[in-house]
Image (cartoon, rainbow, N blue to C red):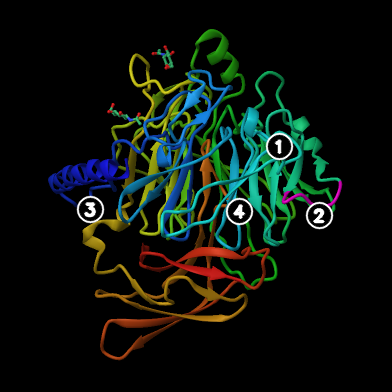
Amino acid sequence: MAARATFIFYALFLTSIQLLLTYHVSSAARGLWKYIAPNVGISAMHMQLLHNDRVVMYDRTNFGPSNISLPNGNCRDNPNDIVSKRDCTAHSIEYDVAMNTVRPLTVQSNTWCSSGSVRPDGVLVQTGGDRDGELKARTFSPCDNNQCDWVEINNGLTKRRWYASNHILPDGKQIVIGGQAQFNYEFFPKTTNPNVVALPFLAETHDQGQENNLYPFVFMNTDGNLFIFANNKAILLDYVKNTVVKTFPAIPGGDPRNYPSTGSAVLLPLKNLEADQIETEVLVCGGAPKGSYNLAFRKKTFVEALDTCARIKINDANPQWTVENMPHARVMGDMILLPNGDVLIINGGSFGTAAWELGREPVLAPDLYHPENPVNSRFESLRPTTIPRMYHSAAILLRDGRVLVGGSNPHAFYNFTGVLFPTELSLEAFSPVYLQREFSDLRPKIISPKPQSTIKYGMNLKLKFTVTGEVTTPVKVTLVFPTFTTHSFAMNQRVLVLDNVKLTRKGKSPTYEVQVRTPKSANIAWPGYYMIFVVNQNIPSEGVWVRLQ
Ligand SMILES: *[C@@H]1O[C@H](CO)[C@@H](O)[C@H](O)[C@H]1NC(C)=O
Ligand SMILES: *[C@@H]1O[C@H](CO)[C@@H](O)[C@H](O)[C@H]1NC(C)=O
């Protein structure tokens, strides 16, 4: 299968090159789409990039055979499967970015609508799922010899975690928050009793019959508390003491932003990290007006999605939302922080809601948000794709600066024909404008640190890089944590703009050295593998994996 997949990808790669040449790159071009794999065997509903540049993806295990066989001719008896009781196909894969190949992985229980994080040692920890998978945790240790696979942990969780959000904590544990009918949170690995802590906020934000608070948006504030947004409002939670330390006003208009009224959210890039009080801003975009789910589900009436974003400084004494309009109304959009600090809003539709068969009118054009620009000059709309990416699609940032896009399956099965949005097994990559050839002169190339180097907290870090064209100060150095993305939310998304940039030119060659300060605490940046980038005039280098510890 691997050989066949390689061949197919190779053939397609040639087609894409031809396609690429037909585009004339000009300043009017707003990014570039490349169809990189027509068929990875599964629908990329959940995606996580690991520090060996491989992406783990999975869908679910009880909805019939996928298009990629399990390794070693294995099969799985699956009495819960709705289509076939014996399944010889894989529902998880590893995608090798550099080789553009896939390898099937083995999950034994249902991973559908689950969550995950990467531990400080680089191991992916996945939590929950459905039915026989709802209490499981699973680990995947990255390897370069194609031998690693999932390890499943029975009763890793105390409560069923379906549509829950996961966040890595500074001590390397994870917190798993909410999920269907769960108004509580727990830790993995389990802590001492009680491992489950009630969170009344999730009951308060639960719209009867619609929910609208699933896959809550969770971010770690720089004081170590968790910002949790569900439905249309947010709290700051001290998860150690289980106290709500702050309550934020409801988002203006009051419309819901979480599943199934799926919008998305990011913590904007954190900067001035040496300050006593770091300004922490959250941006929530899109979603569906109140009542949209019931109208779509019961009456087949598809309401136009929200075209607003709301932004809030969470550490202000009296935090208030500022509302802005997006170029497109969008539900089920993914929000991805780029290495230069801009926000890409990609995928989704402009009518209806998330859930099976309830989205309409795909939004094919991504929108870019420049957080540093003044209000009303922050958005630009980019080149559209041709492939709708509706419910169960995903997007993640790659180390080379592209955004990998996959999945889309609004059906209860793999349905390739006779449906509005056929199940997508393909992958595309979107190259933001900064990757266009006209900027190659400005693009830094990092010489050191070397890949997989360890960096420590609160140290002066020197990076060496080359640029053939002009370097304009200040250059920016950013640390980017790889996200676990599913259901339009990128868990653990964090971009840190490092302080104290001192730039030196080294001799006559186009070599430069930049000195920065690494984050001073694990609350600002938890330990683990980050991609480090040098950004010159808004054009980022390729990233280099470094381990912060
Ligand atoms: C995947 O799809 C192709 C094309 O339809 C088919 O030839 C192949 O047998 C399928 N593979 C599996 C494992 O289902
Ligand atoms: C979707 O796939 C399932 C399982 O293969 C099949 O039973 C069903 O008829 C398909 N639906 C459509 C609309 O083709």
Residue lying farthest to the bottom in this orientation: 507
Residue 178 badge: 1
Give the amino acid at mark 3.
Answer: Ser
Quote the CA–CA distance across marks 2 and 4: 23 Å
- Magenta stretch bounds: 188-193
Q: Quadrant of the N terminus?
A: top left
Q: Are marks 3 and 2 in contact (CB under 8 Å)?
A: no
Q: Residue furthest top?
A: 299
Identify the residue at image location x=37%, y=16%.
Answer: 419
Q: Is residue 439 above or below residue 206?
A: below
Residue 286: horizontal and vertical position, in percent? 52, 35
Q: Which residue is mark 4?
A: 281
Q: Residue 340: percent from the left, percent from the top?
A: 42, 60
Query: Do the CB atoms of the residues marked 1 and 4 lie less than 8 Å apart?
Result: no
The residue tagged with tag 4: helix, strand or loop?
A: strand
N-terminal label among 3 and 4: 3
In the drawing, what numbered circle is on residue 27? Answer: 3
Distance between the alpha carbons at the discs numbered 3 and 4: 31 Å
Q: Nearer the viewer, mark 3 or mark 2?
A: 2
- Mark 1 in CB contact with mark 2 (< 8 angstroms): no
Q: Amino acid at mark 2?
A: Val
Q: Is residue 417 left or right of residue 169?
A: left
Sequence-wise first label, 1 or 3? 3
The C terminus lies in quadrant? bottom right
Residue corresponding to mark 2: 240
- Given residues 182 and 205, the one toward you in this image is 182
Image-quadrant location for residue 185? top right
Residue type indicated by callout 4: Glu
Pinpoint residue 176: horizontal percent, then vertical percent: 69, 44
